[in-house]
Image (cartoon, coloured by chain):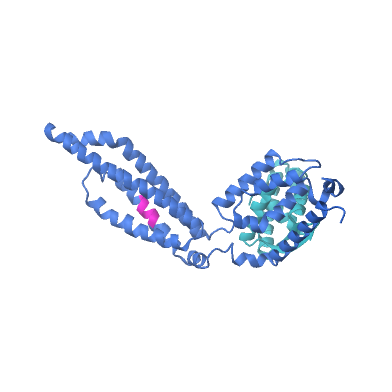
Chain colours: A blue, B cyan
């Protein structure tokens, strides 16, 4: 403690630094490796005299920054990729709306459909319809999950996600279209078909965007944040090593004050 | 362009600065109105760097703390100038309508 009072501007209260480090731990590891020491320096410089722990506002601000950094990585993907991801989010919303509608109207659709049949057959028809509707609902739920997963992977800059998107689009959406078109009238109700057409178009647009020039360069070049930008940081690792050496030397001195 | 971003670019317009320098400068530029918090600052810096508007100038160790100096790139200068011109035009238009007798004759 005596060291802190002698050189207050140098290291600041240890408790405050610990508190800040705990908050900074929310950031992605790669980002922390490059920036933690620097942000810490700014935090400590901004701290008020005698401040013992991080304030509420700055804590919230740091956590917000960390969440943003995790959701949308620092090096933003090119516009085409951003647009594709947004389209996929719209697609997820559309599929979710369709799923909710299907669940909400399943019963009334079932009785309306069964009405056209003689009483002895109505129960069986209703049952068959319920099974086929349930199948559609499960399919939709899986579709939503896959789209969300792919969107997340695309944001993370995975080249594989790009091909998975195209494969999912061709494999599921396009092949799924044929039975939808030929299937019987109730399941392929106008609303259902409209939702499906919207989702299909969104998937088509997203897939095309993902294979345009900028997107291809982005994905083929790997993650720009981890490679291209390190040049920007210069001999950062050498600096960091020096900093660590200085700190450990100082820790040695304070542990052994007579030396 | 968000105000924080605009002020950060303005702070770097005169020369390279490190994180705390930017915070202090932004406070001064805004007349004490905007006090940048570290999380906001570094989210903005990371984004600006990714967009190529700023770059890392150099790194130093001062008082056993890391200091990274940022500078405006030519693209950053261009965008800041554009934004400043836009804001200036908007402000002029507003003032001209509010007090035509004051600004009308001068311009």
A245 vs A24, left or right, is: right
* Residue A1 in the image: above or below residue A168: above
Residue at left offset 53%, top offset 68%:
A221
Residue A222, position as x, y percentages in the image: 53, 65
* Residue B17 in the image: above or below residue B104: below
Quadrant housing residue A247:
bottom right
Task: Report the quarter where the C terminus of chain A lies.
Answer: bottom right
B30 or A161: nearer the eye? Answer: A161
A64 vs A132, left or right, is: right
Residue at left offset 65%, top offset 44%:
A61
Q: Main secondary structure of the magenta part?
A: helix
Residue A33, position as x, y percentages in the image: 65, 58
Quadrant housing residue B66:
bottom right
Residue A177, position as x, y percentages in the image: 28, 54
A210 vs A55, left or right, is: left
Q: Which residues are magenta?
A: A198-203
Q: Is residue B29 visible?
A: no
Residue at left offset 31%, top offset 57%:
A174
């Amino acid at each position: 403690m005596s060291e802190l009072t002698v050189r207050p501007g140098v290291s600041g209260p240890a408790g405050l630094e610990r508190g800040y480090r705990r908050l900074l731990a929310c950031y992605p590891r790669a980002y922390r490796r490059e920036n933690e020491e620097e942000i810490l320096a700014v935090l400590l410089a901004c701290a008020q005299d005698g401040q013992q722990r991080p304030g509420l506002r700055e804590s919230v601000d740091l956590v917000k920054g960390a969440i943003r950094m995790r959701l949308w990585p620092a090096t933003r993907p090119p516009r085409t990729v951003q647009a594709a991801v947004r389209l996929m989010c719209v697609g997820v919303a559309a599929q979710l709306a369709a799923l909710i509608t299907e669940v909400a109207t399943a019963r009334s659709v079932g009785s309306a459909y069964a009405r056209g049949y003689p009483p002895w057959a109505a129960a069986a028809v209703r049952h068959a319809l319920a099974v086929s509707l349930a199948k559609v609902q499960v399919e939709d739920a899986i579709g939503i999950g896959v789209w969300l997963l792919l969107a997340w992977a695309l944001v993370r800059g995975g080249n594989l996600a790009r091909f998975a998107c195209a494969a999912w689009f061709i494999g599921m959406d396009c092949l799924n279209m044929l039975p939808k078109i030929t299937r019987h009238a109730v399941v392929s109700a106008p609303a259902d078909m409209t939702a499906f057409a919207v989702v299909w178009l969104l998937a088509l647009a997203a897939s095309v965007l993902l294979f345009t020039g900028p997107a291809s360069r982005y994905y083929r070049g790997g993650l720009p944040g981890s490679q291209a930008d390190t040049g920007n940081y210069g001999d950062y690792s050498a600096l960091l090593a020096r900093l660590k050496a200085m700190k450990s030397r100082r820790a040695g001195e304070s542990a052994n004050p007579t030396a | 362009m968000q105000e924080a971003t605009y002020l950060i670019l303005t702070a770097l317009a005169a020369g390279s600065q490190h994180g705390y320098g930017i915070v202090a400068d932004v406070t001064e530029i805004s007349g004490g109105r905007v006090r940048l918090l570290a999380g906001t600052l570094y989210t903005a810096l990371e984004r600006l760097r990714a967009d190529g508007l700023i770059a890392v100038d150099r790194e130093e160790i001062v008082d056993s703390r890391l200091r990274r100096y940022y500078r405006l790139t030519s693209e950053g200068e261009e965008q800041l100038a554009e934004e400043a011109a836009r804001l200036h035009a908007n402000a002029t238009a507003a003032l001209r309508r509010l007090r035509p007798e004051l600004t009308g004759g001068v311009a």
